[in-house]
Image (spheres, coloured by chain):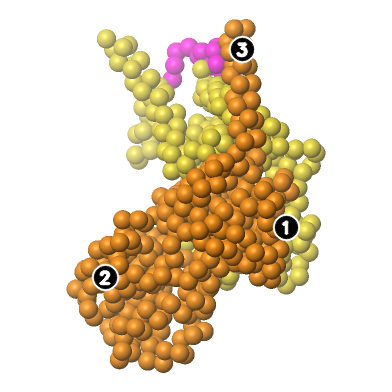
Amino acid sequence: MSTALRHSERQIPDRLTRPAARALKSWESLLAIVAIGIFVLNAWASPYFLDPWNLSDASFNFTEKAMIAFAMAMLIIAGEIDLSVGAIIALASTVMGVAMTAGAPTPVLVLLGLGTGLACGAFNGMLVARFGLPSIVVTIGTMSLFRGISYIILGDGAFTGYPDSFAWFGQGYVFWVITVELVIFTLAALVFGVLLHRTSFGRTVYAIGNNSVAARFSGIRVDRVRFILFLLTGLMSGIAAICLTSRLGSTRPSIASGFELEVVTIVVLGGVSILGGSGSIVGVVLAALVMGLVTFGLGLLNVPGIVMSVVVGALLIAVIAVPRLWAMARAKSRKR
Amino acid sequence: MSILRNILTTAAVASALMAGAAQAETTRIALVVKALGIGFFEAAHKGAEEAAKELGDVEIIYTGPTDTTAEGQIEVINSLIAQRVDAIAVSANDTDALVPTLKKAMDRGITVISWDSGVAPEGRMMNLNPSSAPLIGNTIIKLAADHLPEGGEVAVLSATTTSTNQNTWIEEMNKVAGNYPDVKVVGTVYGDDLADKSYREAQGLMQTYPNLKAIIAPTSVGIVAAAQAVTDAGKIGQVNVTGLGLPSEMAGHVKSGASKSFAIWNPIDLGYSATMIAYHLTKGEAKAEPGATIPIGRMGSVTLDDNNEAAMADPFTYDASNIDQFSSVF
């Protein structure tokens, strides 16, 4: 009931703003300006910033998290959330480690990583879509469950000695400074961009996020869409697990701890409403770039990590709060 | 527009020139720690600055992630590689996960050593241990045994299950436990180097083992939490807390009697020695190869073993007689 009330407050404007003006005022252009600003500031503040190899190294700060953020964005737009993504990485990495120890070749490791991600996503999706449990509760539970299994298998040990060909995913280059991870990131952005913005599936995601009851009455198979979204998030976590494991060249159960919050931060910074119903993939891409540029830029200036997390927190709150405050100020002046 | 551009270009060129000039003169050594805001590493930083002053032409970059993750440390190291520092001396959060990144650093001509918590051999030129693991393992159980003439049950409160240091020390402790037949090690719990979790684990130990005589916490976070838990439970004199800790954080607990004694090497000496070694390797005045001897200033010198590892010194015991002298230092 409460969601119905919330959405009834939305207003339908008498006249739509023109597309050009809308694009200019949009969240994405604000983010793009922030990203360009940070880029210029970084280039000015550190003589080491504008080096292709350095920028290439820096891209690792966000590529893996951003891959998951695309799927997470769709999930949050549909009004759900998955906090178990870091734990899925840990479990997928552990499964790959077990297989590697048993002598499995790289293609098998990759399939197992993807398979584990999908299986974890299916488990989350089943609990949410089939049994109607709230996704935040389910995934807080599976967050401990999946990582717990890794801890049981590994204890205080580690899997090392992945085959050399496996290192390609996290340490390889496709062309010059373009890393394999950067290519996967770009492909994922394109695929999710098309899926969300150019397909009927994408429209149903928005519809569910805005009003799942109305969506159901419109003939949308809401639970099936939710299940698929959890599958996608699991799959992307599996891909991120392959990249991260390959980059670290080892697996420990503490791998990717805290990833879930960083992924959600990127998604929210990207302008996706945490209440569901709105957001875009372009915004998420820009948010990932902003996060990556900020952390790398501050790192180059040897700003302590503690200060860095304060900056990231302040940035997030500022970017979220400023438009809201702006709207409040405008509403106040209109009343007068 | 063009004026602005000129100013920006001039500023960029000037800063590039300045950086270039600075680089030519000074050796930039990055001291990468497990996480910032930990007393032990702040003390190591103090030692590194002392070495830098002694050497004259050294700039210390003290840095690390906010929490003890390998992923965070890799981000920090990537930005150090980008800055083309001359040397990286790292206390690793993960033995293996840092290897690919550190290899890349060495490929780009950066001297890489690990200290305190080591990196796998292929990811560094040499590793400086604060002491040797067998000595530490023996020290922590001996500290417990010294105050238990009758013997009794003791338990271990460690950091995380994946901490390289703690696991090695506990392993070594178990090896020599036979030399202390009256002391019975009944269990190991993990406080994850978090104050609140360590506190709860220590409480749990006292409840699970009512006859517990001592808690050995080979971690500076765990030992304080355990001493506090013992104090709060009113078991001072009944349960002795010992292990490895920082004098400044333990002073109160030594005076209250919750901890009769504990040990630690001197982190100031450790940061000092790591800096000395990084400097001599960068300048080509020493080589990192088995059997090589590297001078470490006022600490004398270290000799590398077959794994290119070296031990700095023996751990030092702190008790009521000397705690005041050291608690103001670190």
Q: Secondary structure at mark 1?
A: helix
Between disc 3 and disc 1, the foreground one is: 3
Instruction: Report the magenta residues as a range.
Output: A12-24
Q: Which residue is mark 1?
A: A110
Q: Residue A123, how many percent across, how many down?
A: 55, 59
Q: Which residue is mark 3?
A: B5
Q: Quadrant of the N terminus of chain A?
A: top left
Q: Which residue is mark 2?
A: B320
- Whether the residues at callouts 2 and 3 have beta carbons within 8 Å, the answer is no
Q: Secondary structure at mark 3?
A: helix
Q: Are marks 3 and 1 on the same chain?
A: no
In the displayed structure, would residue A285 be above or below residue A101?
above
Q: Are marks 1 and 2 on the same chain?
A: no
Q: Which mark is residue A308?
A: none
Mark 3 is on which residue type? Arg
Which chain is rendered orange in the image? B
Give the chain of mark 2.
B
- What's the distance in space between the residues labelled 2 and 3, CA to CA? 65 Å
**Mark positioned earlier in the residue sequence (2 or 3):** 3
Q: Residue B198, how many percent across, how many down?
A: 36, 66
